[in-house]
Image: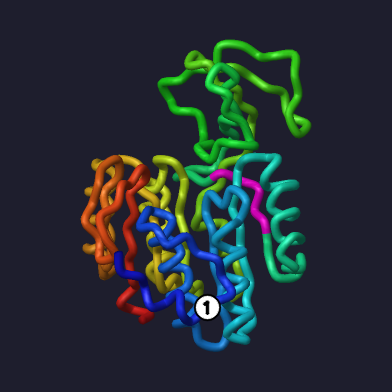
């Protein structure tokens, strides 16, 4: 398999040399750092533990440019504890990052948010698929347990969930003071089309690059149509749930990926 030349510019980063969805996410983040001008700004939407922000900070330090990281994460333990611990572990001071403890959607409201599935042994320690509860997966009972100060409920499909605040991405990005965002990195478990549609005006005006983790072929087709109509240039497009031939070898993708450049800002 070939290897992206971008990695040679940041040898302090330990990157798995296997073509997969994460490999292309690394490429997007590092290319965004490499192309940043006087400072670097990443917004990680569905941040989990903030790994891509951590990598971006390491690369920005290697380049010697100022940086700031914005993490948007709805899972309460990760937003309130885990991201802070990951940044501390990597010597990233609190002054260099901001956490918005919300999930994102096309409207602002309180929503139930998956945190675990006991039958499948999924929880914050080993699961990265948390999201707002699907409309068809109804809440059926409240449990006598509390998670991060929130009462836990159970859904028809056996998931545990807690109430969190959902915000519109456009409103959150309007809180970011820097005028240009070098990259928005999306991993929002099936909400990517509606969230990008809602926030398209601010993405068009202020964001240079999008890395989007995709979760269905329908979402992928919607994004291709929406973003092309709005002047974005698609440079990588590997559909989800299949094997794809890539410039670095054949690879199996669980989540798909799309990389878009904003022709207005590049």
Whether residue 27 appears in this view of the structure is yes
Choose between 18 and 212: the one closer to the eye: 18
> What secondary structure is the magenta-colored segment mainly?
strand
Q: Position of residue 110 (x, y in %)?
A: 60, 34
Place residue 137 in its image quadrant: top left
Q: Which residue occupies 42% across, 65% down?
A: 203
Q: Is residue 101 magenta?
A: yes
Direction top: furthest residue:
141
Q: Position of residue 216 (x, y in %)?
A: 30, 40
Q: Which residues are magenta?
A: 99-103
Viewed as shown, does residue 69 lie left or right of 131?
A: right
Q: Which residue occupies 60% across, 26% down?
A: 161
Q: Which residue is mark 1?
A: 10
Q: Is residue 228 above or below residue 79?
A: below
Choose between 148 and 226: the one closer to the eye: 148
Whether residue 112 appears in this view of the structure is no
Choose between 152 and 110: the one closer to the eye: 152
Choose between 241 and 4: the one closer to the eye: 4
Q: Position of residue 143 (x, y in %)?
A: 69, 14
Q: Position of residue 49 (x, y in %)?
A: 62, 51
Quadrant occupied by the N terminus: bottom left
- Regarding mark 1 in the picture, which secondary structure is present there? loop
């Amino acid at each position: 398999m070939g290897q992206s030349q971008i990695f040679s510019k940041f040898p302090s980063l330990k990157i798995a040399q296997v073509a997969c969805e994460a490999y292309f996410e690394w490429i997007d983040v590092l290319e965004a750092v490499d192309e940043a001008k006087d400072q670097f700004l990443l917004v990680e939407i569905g941040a989990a533990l903030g790994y891509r922000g951590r990598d971006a900070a390491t690369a920005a330090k290697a380049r010697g440019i100022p940086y700031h990281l914005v993490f948007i994460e709805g899972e309460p333990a990760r937003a309130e504890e885990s991201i802070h611990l990951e940044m501390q572990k990597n010597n990233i001071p609190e002054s260099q990052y901001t956490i918005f403890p919300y999930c994102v959607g096309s409207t602002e409201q309180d929503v139930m948010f998956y945190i675990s599935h006991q039958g499948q042994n999924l929880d914050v320690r080993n699961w990265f698929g948390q999201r707002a509860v699907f409309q068809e997966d109804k809440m059926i009972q409240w449990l006598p347990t509390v998670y991060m100060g929130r009462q836990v409920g159970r859904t028809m499909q056996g998931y545990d969930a807690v109430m969190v605040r959902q915000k519109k991405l456009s409103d959150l990005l309007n809180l970011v003071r820097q005028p240009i965002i070098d990259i928005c990195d999306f991993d929002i478990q099936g909400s990517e089309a509606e969230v990008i549609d809602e926030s398209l005006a601010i993405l068009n005006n202020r964001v240079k690059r999008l890395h989007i983790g995709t979760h269905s072929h329908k979402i992928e087709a919607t994004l291709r149509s929406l973003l092309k109509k709005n002047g974005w240039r698609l440079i990588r497009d590997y559909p989800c749930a299949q094997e794809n031939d890539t410039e670095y070898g054949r690879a199996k993708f669980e989540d798909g990926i799309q990389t878009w450049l904003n022709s207005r800002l590049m």
